[in-house]
Image (tube, rainbow, N blue to C red):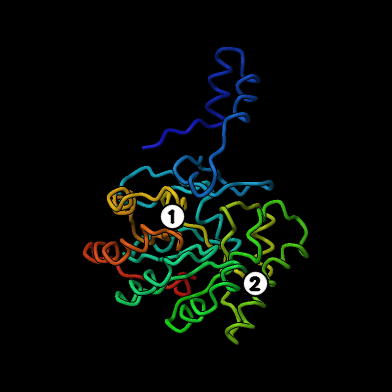
């Protein structure tokens, strides 16, 4: 269970003591966690802020979908999702692939063994340095999604031309390599976004995909143990989960076969993001 301090709470406390303004200032000085680590700490809000926001989640009940800092209904108006149909025991597997360090083949092997479709959100560097793996993803029926050409903080990009350059630049690399158009699924780097970003992606025909389950797996020099990974990924799985894993994780490569087996044992099946929309 996670306890969050909201702006309204601070102001109510402050009003009683006559120091609401001071506490409101302190609210803006509270440290912000990096995404996707912020998933455990985010406050629920009614709408997407016009300025910068980090995607965040609050896990309130074990085995139930978490609450996003933007609601699923609000996101849908921009063709954006963080969770699927919560009445169905379906899991959507996604991998962020910023670069290749030798772990992706084992991940693909596990997915193939379980006949589990996934979406790999890649950047330009991955296509340049691991073209054979990108081709294998396509050949084995996975979606290759758009994680931008250079992996910038897209929330700092306000003009459409610059936003589009990051998106279409990656599309062009993918098409040049595979001869196929890129399927239009977009994940904001670091989970950083703004309302304008969501509008821009929608205008380009993209579905923006956040996540409802992730864990700290991206530090290659400080990888979690198998037990630590399972302790995060098993209790928090839920209907309609969009799972974010990093393909650079040695732990993920090692445990994925067993993890998928455990989820299957709980009655879950694996769906494609194409079905989500």
| Left or right: residue 100 compared with residue 124 | left
Q: Name the residue under label 1.
A: 212
Give residue 208's position: percent from left, percent from top: 57, 63
The outermost residue toward the top is 17
Is 113 located above or below residue 74 in the figure?
Answer: below
Number of the label disc, if any, that sits on residue 236? none
Give the CA distance from mark 1 to mark 2: 25 Å
Q: Mark 2 points at which residue?
A: 170
The outermost residue toward the bottom is 179
Is 126 located above or below residue 12 in the figure?
Answer: below
Residue depicted at x 67% and y 61%? 199
Give residue 50's position: percent from left, percent from top: 68, 48
Residue depicted at x 43% and y 73%? 272
Q: Earlier in the sequence, mark 1 or mark 2?
A: 2
Residue depicted at x 51% and y 80%? 132
Q: Quadrant of residue 157?
A: bottom right
Towards the viewer: 136 or 186: 136
Towards the viewer: 263 or 276: 263
Give residue 211's position: percent from left, percent from top: 47, 57
Q: Nearer the viewer, mark 1 or mark 2?
A: 2
Give residue 62's position: percent from left, percent from top: 31, 46
| Left or right: residue 63 compared with residue 41 | left
Is 35 located above or below residue 94 in the figure?
Answer: above
Query: In what element is the residue under mark 2?
Result: helix
Query: In what element is the residue under mark 1?
Result: loop
Is 158 located above or below residue 16 in the figure?
Answer: below
- What crowding class fits label 1: few (fewer than 14 Cα within 10 Å), some (14-19), or many (20 or more)? many
Asked if disc 1 and disc 2 are in contact, CB closer than 8 Å, the reply is no
Residue depicted at x 46% and y 50%? 219
| Left or right: residue 249 compared with residue 12 | left
């Amino acid at each position: 269970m996670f306890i969050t301090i909201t702006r309204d709470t601070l102001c109510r406390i402050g009003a009683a003591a006559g120091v609401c303004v001071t506490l409101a200032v302190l609210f803006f000085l509270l440290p912000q966690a990096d995404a996707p680590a912020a998933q455990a700490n985010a406050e629920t809000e009614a709408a997407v802020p016009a300025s910068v926001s980090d995607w965040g989640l609050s896990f309130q009940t074990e085995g139930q979908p978490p609450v996003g800092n933007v609601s699923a209904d609000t996101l849908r108006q921009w063709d954006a999702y963080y969770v699927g149909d919560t009445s169905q025991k379906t899991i959507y597997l996604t991998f962020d692939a910023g670069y290749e360090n030798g772990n992706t083949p084992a991940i693909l092997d596990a997915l193939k063994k379980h006949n589990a479709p996934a979406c790999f959100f890649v950047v330009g560097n991955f296509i340049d340095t691991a073209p054979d793996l990108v081709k294998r993803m396509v050949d084995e029926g996975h979606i290759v999604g758009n994680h931008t050409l250079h992996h910038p903080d897209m929330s700092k990009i306000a003009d459409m031309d610059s936003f589009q350059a990051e998106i279409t630049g990656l599309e062009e690399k993918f098409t040049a390599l595979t001869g196929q158009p890129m399927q239009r699924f977009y994940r904001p780097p670091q989970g950083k976004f703004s309302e304008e970003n969501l509008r821009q992606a929608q205008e380009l025909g993209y579905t923006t995909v956040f996540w409802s389950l992730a864990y700290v797996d991206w530090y290659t020099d400080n990888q979690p143990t198998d037990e630590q990974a399972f302790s995060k990924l098993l209790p928090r799985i839920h209907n309609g989960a969009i799972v974010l894993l990093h393909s650079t994780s040695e732990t993920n490569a090692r445990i994925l076969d067993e993890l998928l087996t455990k989820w299957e044992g709980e009655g879950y099946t694996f769906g494609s993001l194409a079905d989500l929309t």
